[in-house]
Image (cartoon, rainbow, N blue to C red):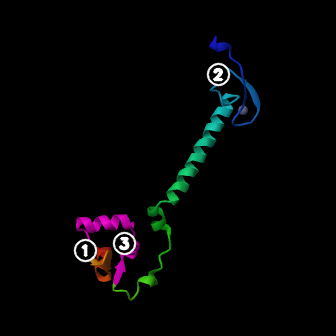
Amino acid sequence: MASSIRVNKTCEYCKQEFIAKTIHTRYCSHRCNQKGYKRKERNSKVELAVKAAETPDFRLKHQKVDWHRFEGKPYLTLKEAALLLNITPVTLRRWVKEGVISSSKAGKKHLFERKMLDEKISH
Ligand SMILES: [Zn+2]
């Protein structure tokens, strides 16, 4: 019974109409199936790359750091210090918690000694 099903479908790759034997068929031919699959794979890779570019880690690695803004500042905020260390603020906060790095607290804000950060970088 099921084998007698004939469904009018449009090929997802070449957009031509064809008669499919099952409702799950998406391509008119094996060739279109392969090409369509490859295209999908490529598209999903592009999507992944776009998603990666949106993560803070990626942005940190690729943004231009304006080093001048750190000049002459004996203390840096959490955000600035993370930028300097090329890590995310989340990581830096964890480092503070784990005692990897020490911070002075000004109210609720973390402050990091520039000298100490420079030492961390050179190590
Ligand atoms: Zn086709």
Q: Position of residue 80 (x, y in %)?
A: 40, 76
Question: What span is colored magenta in the figure?
Answer: 75-102
| The quadrant where residue 101 appears | bottom left
Q: CA distance from mark 1 to mark 2?
A: 65 Å
Position of 63 compared to 36: left or right? left
| The quadrant where residue 25 appears | top right
Report the amino acid beneath label 1: Ser
Dominant secondary-structure state across the stretch colored magenta:
helix
Report the amino acid beneath label 3: Leu
Image quarter for ligand 1 equals: top right
Q: CA distance from mark 3 to mark 2?
A: 57 Å
Earlier-in-chain disc, 3 versus 1: 3
Secondary structure category for the residue under label 2: loop
Quadrant where the N terminus lies? top right
Mark number for residue 85? 3
Residue at the image point whose x is 40% and y is 73% from the top: 79
Asked whether 16 or 113 is in front, the reply is 113
Q: CA distance from mark 3 to mark 1?
A: 14 Å
Q: Position of residue 90 (x, y in %)?
A: 36, 64
Position of 60 compared to 2: left or right? left
Q: Are marks 1 and 2 in contact (CB under 8 Å)?
A: no
Mark number for residue 102? 1
Q: Which residue is mark 2?
A: 22
Q: Position of residue 5 (x, y in %)?
A: 68, 17
